[in-house]
């Protein structure tokens, strides 16, 4: 397979632009760490989590396909003041849990979260537990190593 030179240049320009964007803002606002330790899963649940940066208006959607009992995910915000505007767990076309883990509670400033999910993940809300811990101003820094 032969790649045209013009295609290579286009890809290099795209990648270069992506690197410049990543270097322009190297700090992450708050962090939502998600740990799951389920005993059993029913169906193929999907968790939609949408976070809005209140200061910049940036909306970040996260979609987690839950296919195994133990998972670790991280959702980042790009500001220190944010709001979870959607947290819904879907088990197919008919079963949906809105405001999953009761995360849609208003605006948070300078607080990150650790969300731990345990139990049996099923459309019945009493079968699983959500434990949400909040802590002050945890900042992650993204670095770009240069030789």
Image (tube, rainbow, N blue to C red):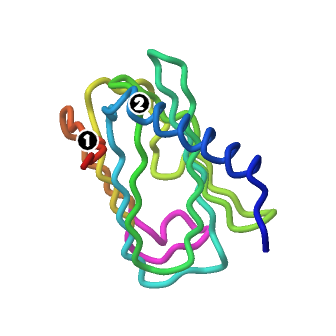
- Kindly indicate the quadrant of the structure image that contains residue 81: top left
- SS assignment at label 1: loop
Residue at the limit of the structure toward the top, as seen here = 55
Question: Residue 55 at what x, y percent from top left?
Answer: 44, 15
- SS assignment at label 2: loop
- Kindly indicate the quadrant of the structure image that contains residue 59: top right
In front: 10, or 142?
Answer: 10
Residue 78: which numbered mark, if any? 2
Q: Residue at x 56, y 61 (%)?
A: 64
78 left or right, relative to 112: right
Q: In this view, does 8 lie above or below 83?
A: below
53 left or right, relative to 118: right
Q: Dividing the image into 4 quarters, which one contains the N terminus?
A: bottom right
Q: Earlier in the sequence, mark 2 or mark 1?
A: 2
Please tell me whether residue 47 belongs to the stretch shown in magenta.
Answer: no
Q: Is residue 71 above or below residue 5?
A: below
Q: Which residue is drawn at 46% across and 51% down?
A: 101
> Dot 2: within a 10 Å radius of its alpha carbon, few (fewer than 14), some, or many (20 or more) residues?
many
Magenta part of the chain: 118-129
Question: Residue 136 at what x, y percent from top left?
Answer: 18, 34
Residue under circle 1? Answer: 140
Q: How far apart are marks 2 and 1 (CA)?
A: 10 Å
Number of labelled discs? Answer: 2
3 left or right, relative to 12: right
Please tell me whether residue 128 belongs to the stretch shown in magenta.
Answer: yes
Q: Which residue is drawn at 46% across and 45% down?
A: 102
- Kindly indicate the quadrant of the structure image that contains residue 138: top left
Question: Residue 146 at what x, y percent from top left?
Answer: 27, 46
Residue at the limit of the structure toward the bottom, as seen here = 40
Q: Do the residues labelled 2 and 1 touch (CB within 8 Å)?
A: no
In front: 124, or 19?
Answer: 19
């Amino acid at each position: 397979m032969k790649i045209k030179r013009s295609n290579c240049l286009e890809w290099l320009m795209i990648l270069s632009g992506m690197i410049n964007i990543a270097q322009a803002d190297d700090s992450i606002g708050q962090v939502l760490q998600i740990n799951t330790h389920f005993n059993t899963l029913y169906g193929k649940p999907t968790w939609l989590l949408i976070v809005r940066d209140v200061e910049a208006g940036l909306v970040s959607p996260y979609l987690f396909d839950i296919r195994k009992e133990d998972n670790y995910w991280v959702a980042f915000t790009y500001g220190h003041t944010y709001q979870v505007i959607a947290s819904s767990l879907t088990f197919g076309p008919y079963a949906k849990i809105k405001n999953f883990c009761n995360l849609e509670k208003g605006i948070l400033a300078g607080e990150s979260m650790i969300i731990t999910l345990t139990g049996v993940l099923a459309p019945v809300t009493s079968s699983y537990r959500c434990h949400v811990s909040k802590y002050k101003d945890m900042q992650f820094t993204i670095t770009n190593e240069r030789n």
